[in-house]
Image (spheres, helix red, strand yellow):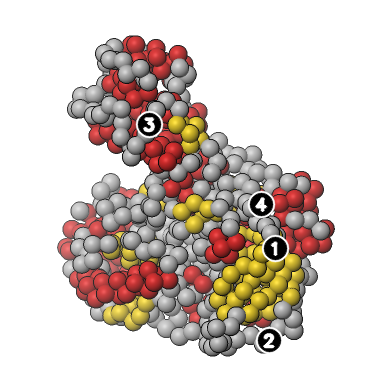
Amino acid sequence: MRKGKVLSKIKYGAAPLALLMAFIFLFIAVGGMELGQVMASAMASNIDGEAAVEPASDTYDLIVVGGEPEGIAAAVSAARNGLRTLLVEEGAALGGLMTLGGLNFLDMSYGPDKELLTQGIFAEFYEEMDNAFDLEEAKAYFLQLVEQEENLDLRLNTSFVAPVLEGKTIKGIEVKEKGQDQAKSKVYYGARLIDATVDADVAAAAGVPYTVGAEDYGRPEELMAVTLVFRVKGVNWPYVFIYNNLMRLLSLLKEGWGDPFAGANWKVAWGYGQQALEYQAHDPKVRFRGPNLARQKDGTVLVNALLLFGVNGVDPVSRVQGIARGQAELPYIIEFMRERFPGFARVELVDTAERLYVRETRHIQGEYRLTITDVLENRDHWDRIAHGSYPVDIQPTAPDNLGNVIGKPLIYSIPFRCLVPLEIDHLLVVGRSASYDSLPHGSARVIPVGMATGEAAGVAAAYSIEKGLGFRELSRSEEAIGAIQERLLKQGAHLKVYTPPRLAVMDHWAYPAMSAMRELGLAAGGYGNDYRLDQPIQYWDAQYVFTQTLARITALVERGFARAENIDEIESGKAPVEIVFAEGLNKGDLLLMAARLLDKNKREWESADAALSYLVEQKYLRPAEAEHFADLAGSPTFGELYAAAAALQKGLYTRETK
């Protein structure tokens, strides 16, 4: 029988006060803070890396580089489809981020009917291990999964050095094995290759084009924070369980009480968000957030909460320095947790993960690039090979911001074309560095979705070899994609064809403009997809949106993602006129600013009526949008702000594929 798959959440019936009293008595019985203190705060060891036996030959049907969960799924899938497969991993154990990085509390994707969307090989893992698991058990599980496949050879402690290319076709890889003479390397050849490294290292080295971080929406050099997971002992778990569920219950009783984002079961807990915000880091590029907590079989607890900024995830030296910085901060964090986290009074640090949890580096350019609109309009694609639904979770990119949830999809599909990189043939890329724009990557980056794409890549490799088709040719063939989908369905994948659920916000008059701003990362709906389109704005909202619209378009033009249309010279975000809004701004002020920024003739725009006419005549503002500016002296809403800013965007540039 399948284990319980949904995190246990307490269901609150018609008598929450009775439940509240029960929690209070349990809370006191377990021990910890005085009741008054609680109410006041609420209302305010590896598997040794023995190298695998020498393969019988150095030539394979398929080589998979990267022992991350996505790579394991790809290799196992290919082997089950008859391919003689080699899996190469630089570490001493399999599992990558899930084991060596300590990320043992997974982000799941469920469909509109609460069904698990990431079936197949991930579901095998899930049935055995659940979505929170013991690291040593996970290492053993992955090793057994790989070793039981007769067609699959494993090389641990083996680092990728360089691709072997013949023109624009990848033919194999050069590697170095731990303990080998460092002056020597080894070459493996494969008819097909799958890059399952977290940073698309093989693809990048082969010459596949890519973007870095958020540069594709005008935020160059901006990357989500990395995390150093750490392990503690001495946690009073019954206390943690009761406290965090009490916080959630209180939030249901009255707004402003408790914590709606807290909760716990006997394996995992999440919460302490308000306390974490009070932590003052000693390192200015460190932040401590509300933790995800997961118990291990030995009673220790893994903590995912320590954010590190300024780490270059593709630079080994920077990663080592990041780990050192995190470890230097931890004594202060442990002391803070003892003082401020109920259930942590006797906590002690045990160790840290050996690898960082790096959320974002490269995003390859593929035959198709998944967009934020694809994800948040719940779009299906003809060449679907996986489904997802995790929120678009953009973690903080700097110590002074908290990150954002752009929206929550109900279901979306990932096209096979997202795995097929431009420029290089016989190569697929799976995992977070596949061909996703930076924003939708906030959802598609999660491991279960990556494992589903990895499984599909393994099937595609087998079909490609059987039919003598390259991946690019395959990606354009409905017949070939249909055959791959059929095989995946037989393997248990979730690939149903669906009519995209339509969110109510999509029928709002301002939706097209908001969607344009969302593509620039300037509109977010949170978990409830509430973009506040009818809510009045403050002058600083207009200041921020207009300034950032210009700055992000400038960056896009400078990096070749867009072509400037209406500004002769865009230099470092400098506007032709100063962008200044004042308290008491009205709808006309928004239109005047847009017209002044767009007008090449540099006219003196004094009349909001004239600005409105100009924007409509130039087709920067749609007639349906113009109707909402009839009262030019009225107070603007977010809908009207987005309409004016989208008019500016439309007039300034034309989006291009880099």
Q: Earlier in the sequence, mark 2 or mark 1?
A: 2
Q: CA distance from mark 2 to mark 4?
A: 33 Å
Q: Which residue is mark 4?
A: 416
Asked if residue 241 lies left or right of residue 39, the reply is: right
Mark 3 Cα-neighbour bin, 10 Å: few <14, some 14–19, many ≥20: few
Q: CA distance from mark 1 to mark 3?
A: 42 Å
Residue 332 vs residue 131, the one in the foreground: 332
Label disc, if present, on residue 166 of the rendered structure: 1
**Which type of secondary structure does the marked residue at label 1 adopt?**
strand
Above or below 321: residue 21: above
Question: Looking at the image, which residue is at 51% across and 48% down?
Answer: 437
Q: Nearer the viewer, mark 1 or mark 4?
A: 1
Amino acid type assigned to the residue bearing label 3 in the image: Glu
Q: Nearer the viewer, mark 4 or mark 3?
A: 3
Mark 1 Cα-neighbour bin, 10 Å: few <14, some 14–19, many ≥20: few
Q: Earlier in the sequence, mark 1 or mark 4?
A: 1
**Which type of secondary structure does the marked residue at label 4 adopt?**
helix
Q: Which residue is mark 2?
A: 54
Residue 262 vs residue 274, the one in the foreground: 274
Q: CA distance from mark 1 to mark 4?
A: 24 Å
Q: CA distance from mark 4 to mark 3?
A: 39 Å
Q: Quadrant of the N terminus?
A: bottom right
Asked if residue 458 lies left or right of residue 228, the reply is: right
Label 4–label 3 contact, CB within 8 A: no
Q: Where's residue 128, x and y in %?
A: 59, 73
**Which type of secondary structure does the marked residue at label 3 adopt?**
loop
Q: Earlier in the sequence, mark 1 or mark 3?
A: 1
Q: Which residue is mark 3?
A: 569
Q: Nearer the viewer, mark 2 or mark 1?
A: 1
